[in-house]
Image: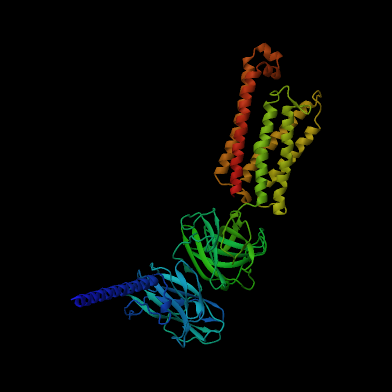
Amino acid sequence: MYRVELHCRNWQHRGEASAMWRLYFTLAALTWCVDSVGGFSNGKVGVACGDMEPQHGHEPRPEPPPYMVSVDKSTFSPGENITVSLQVASSDPMFFRGFLMEARDAGKLDSPAVGFFILTDPHQSQLLQCGHTQGSGVSHTRNTKKTQVQAVWESPEKPPQRVQFLVTVVHGYKIYWVKIAGPVVSLREMTAAPTTAVSPQTTSPTALSTQFSSVGCGHSKSCLRDPVGCDPESDPHCFFLSFTTDEAGRSVMFELSGPTEGYVSFALSHDKWMGNDDVYLCENDRGSVTISAGYVSGRTHPELAAEEALWGRAWRLVDGVIQCRFHRSIHLHNRFNLNQSYFLFLAHGRSHNGLIYKHHHQPLISTIQKVITGLPEDLSGSRSPLLIKFHGVFMLTVWMWIVSTAALIARHYKDFWPDTTVLGQRLWFQLHRTMMVLAVVLTSAAFTLPFIYRRGWSKGAGSHPYIGCAVMALSIIQPIMAILRPVPESPRRIIFRWLHFGAGTAAQILATVCVFLGAAQQALLLPSPWSPAVLTGWLLWIMMVDLLLLIHQCRLRGNSSSDDKENISFAQLDRLQHGEISKVKKMVLVVFLIGNTGFLAAFIKTIASL
């Protein structure tokens, strides 16, 4: 009985173990299926490189595919690039979700893939290793709907005589076409073999299907943006430049975007001066975009180069925003070597019938030099040179704060400290003289900075530099006049007072006009209408304070008797009512200084952010 029970238990354990193994096997099979499907949806189809067939368990479609494969040239040399495009052939709302692209020896289509590809849009496609060569195949990155993809094929050093491009296209899990025959391209000086595929297309750029994005800036690609941190995908006012080196280290892909009706461009420069620069332009040409390279040898129009310098060109033009993408070899004859470091210029402007006009605003210039093929960085830049920023800060400090305060003290506070002296002179005079000497020194320093930056006279600044020269001359005349002033008892003292007052007032008026004009200069373009509005507010502020102190003096005069008006001077009147007067004047002076400081701080902060 015991043996029978033991025998039954053994059979029971064996049955449970068998069921458990069957469960493990089923789970493993399901896991393999899920991994296969998930991998294919992500484009990881390296296992299909040989026969190029999706492992979907269905037969490929027998009818002609609704897609076409095209190339931008029919012949090639070793190491040369060919742009290969896959797109929907019919006008119907057709699409595809996945693809696999290879280049093979046209005489041995069952042989491994030859050459390797360079991505034009890493968001839509990825490189595969088919055989022993990394990048010899291209596939999708996700199973979203697509109507067009593009890649650049680079010929190997020892290519076959003829190469044919083959593409497998997946419309749906059960609907796909295998090894769609693309064009045959021939090694140069060989005759191209006939093919049933669509004839090669021209070198015109193709249309971008998606907007550029700042995702990956500083991590997978280098970016230069204005405003700082903007995203061209969501901000229509964003000027954007990105570049990334391909996996093979042979070329760089550039993406350029900006709101303009004419052109957007960038340049590689050895310094922060325009001239002798490598320039790349994307121009609005009556609803399409022309992508070209050029060279600027001074402040002249760029000399455009042959189109063969760039490949993989694509563009997008929506709501006045130009976006373009292209590839360029790292080493290229008569072009800058991308393995070196350069300052980056980002500019835009007007164009008409292919003629490029001068950019509207000062170009955005990177703050540091950048190795184009170096590690990814999120670069910062400025549209205003540092010397011009200091020029603006010095001038605003002088005429918005120092001069206005010194003039206010001389006009209304001569008798505010009647018994206080510094170095033998009354306090108001020492304050006025010290501030005016400081104003002359800072004005002189600020005056020289634009000449240092421009290396001469600025011809495109309008009337601003001429008025600035007049202000500088009056600033020098004022202290000379003060040194040569006659003694207080001299009958010529009244002449000095009027000349000193007139020259000082003229300098203030011209300086104010100059500040308004300077806020609209390209080299220091302050935001509009903010800057004119704040400058107008500051001007009304100092006029209001001056008017308030004049009314205060008139009221004090009116409160005195008629006999007092004939016999008592303003200084005596101030001493009689010193308590009331000093309290009001002190409060007005403090409020005036706080207001002036606020206006000045707002402008300094704005200039620092340019």
Visual colour scheme? rainbow
Q: Is residue 327 visible?
A: yes
Task: Check the image and name the residue furthest to the left.
Answer: 1
Q: Nearer the viewer, residue 158 or 289?
A: 158
Q: Is residue 126 left or right of residue 277?
A: left
Q: Quadrant of residue 410?
A: top right
Residue 76 vertical placement versus 506 (above, below): below
**62 displayed left or right of 470:** left
Q: Quadrant of residue 10?
A: bottom left
> Is residue 603 found left or right of 133 in the rendered image?
right
Is residue 563 shown above or below 177? above
Measured as percent of width and height from the top left, residue 548 is found at: 60, 26
The N terminus, quarter of image: bottom left
* Residue located 81% across and 28% down the image: 486
Pinpoint residue 287: horizontal percent, then vertical percent. 48, 63
> Where residue 176 appears, x then y in whole percent?
35, 76
The relative height of residue 219 versus residue 576 in the rendered view (above or below) is: below
**Residue 541 image position (x, y, % from top left):** 59, 33
User: What residue is rendered at 41% in x and 78% in y?
Assistant: 47
Residue found 79% across the figure and 36% down from its top = 480
Residue at the spot x=59%, y=65% of the render?
374
